[in-house]
Amino acid sequence: MPIQKVLVVDDSKTELMYLTDLLQKRGMQVRTAENAEEAIKRLSEDKPDLILMDVVMPGQNGFQLTRTISRDPAYADVPIIMCTSKNQETDRVWGMRQGARGYITKPVDPAELQAKIDALN
């Protein structure tokens, strides 16, 4: 099933704008959330086909939110790609253990992001 609806979770307005623009140019519908509470609210309003998740956010971080979402039967089938400045191998491994299906580091390379999305289809 092609990915149409994407939820981007990031506390940086610059990152949100950049990723939204990038995805919309590829014909995807994008919704955004700036923190975990907003992300959960967006999920309940309209289930996305993909979530791009930042790690470093105020309140609940992206690792915790990924674990929460991936363990919820209602959303367990929604793939999550971690999209973060945390570029250590241990961070990548931990993100995947929390339920992420992909992990890319910022600054996001559009071709790398597209390859990760294509791999999910």
Image (cartoon, helix red, strand yellow):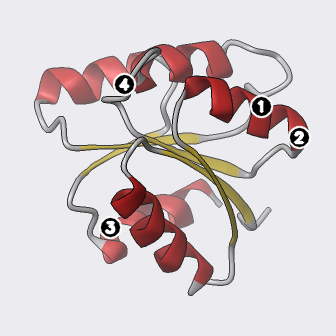
User: Which residue in the protein does label 3 denote?
Assistant: 112
The picture quadrant where one finds residue 40 is top right
User: Which residue in the protein does label 1 denote?
Assistant: 41
Q: Quadrant of the C terminus?
A: bottom right
Q: Nearer the viewer, mark 4 or mark 1?
A: 1
Residue 85 on image: x %, y %:
20, 43
Q: Are marks 4 and 1 in contact (CB under 8 Å)?
A: no
> Of label 2 and label 3, which has the lower sequence position?
2
The picture quadrant where one finds residue 1 is bottom right
Q: Are marks 2 and 1 in contact (CB under 8 Å)?
A: yes
Helix, strand, or loop for circle 2? helix
What type is the residue that disc 4 sits on? Gly
What type is the residue that disc 2 sits on? Glu
Q: What is the CA distance from the residue labelled 2 to the residue labelled 3?
A: 29 Å
Q: Residue at x 62, y 41 (%)?
A: 79
User: Which residue in the protein does label 2 denote?
Assistant: 45
User: What is the crowding at mark 4: few (fewer than 14 residues within 10 Å), some, or many (at least 20)?
Assistant: many
Q: Are marks 2 and 4 in contact (CB under 8 Å)?
A: no
What type is the residue that disc 3 sits on? Glu
Q: What is the CA distance from the residue labelled 3 to the residue labelled 1?
A: 29 Å
Helix, strand, or loop for circle 3? helix
